[in-house]
């Protein structure tokens, strides 16, 4: 299982699921973090936390603590 916090800069992945125990689950789903959506890491802060991700044309910063609750996989071509 790979989580969003492990994704390197400029890498694209597909969201598999947002874990149930995530306190931000409803908010993340509203922002477009839904299964099947493509997401890309576009910025890493100097201390590696938080990171910014591009999803549905928007850039959203997430702490690694929250990004660990999002399961992802590399796209299959």
Image (cartoon, helix red, strand yellow):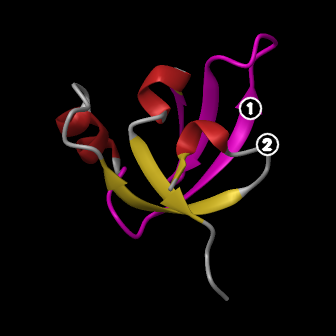
- Going 44% across and 52% down the picture, which residue do you hit? 71
Where disc 2 sits, the SS reads: loop
Q: Position of residue 47 (x, y in %)?
A: 77, 10
Residue at the outermost top position: 47
Where disc 1 sits, the SS reads: strand
- Going 34% across and 64% down the picture, which residue do you hit? 35
- Going from N to C along the chain, the mark reached first, 2 or 1, is 2
Q: Are discs 2 and 1 less than 8 Å apart at CB?
A: yes
Is there any visible trace of residue 11 in the rendered image? yes
Q: State left or right for residue 51 relative to residue 56.
A: right
For the residues carrying marks 2 and 1, which lies nearer the camera in this image? 2
Residue at the outermost bottom position: 77
Q: Which residue is mark 2?
A: 9
Quadrant location of residue 59? top right
Q: Quadrant of the C terminus?
A: bottom right
Q: Position of residue 63 (x, y in %)?
A: 52, 20
Q: Which residue is mark 1?
A: 43
- Going 82% across and 13% down the picture, which residue do you hit? 46
Distance from disc 2 to disc 1, alpha carbons, whole Å, reads 6 Å
Vertical side of 16 occupied by 62: above or below = above
Q: Which residues are magenta?
A: 33-61
Q: Position of residue 43 (x, y in %)?
A: 74, 32
Q: Nearer the viewer, residue 69 or 45?
A: 69
């Amino acid at each position: 299982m790979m989580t969003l916090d492990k994704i390197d800069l400029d890498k694209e992945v597909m969201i598999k699921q947002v874990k149930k125990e995530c306190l931000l689950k409803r908010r993340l789903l509203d922002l477009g973090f839904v299964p099947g959506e493509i997401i890309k890491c576009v910025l890493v802060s100097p201390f590696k936390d938080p990171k910014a991700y591009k999803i549905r044309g928007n850039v959203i910063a997430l702490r690694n603590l929250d990004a660990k609750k999002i399961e992802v996989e590399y796209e299959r071509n």
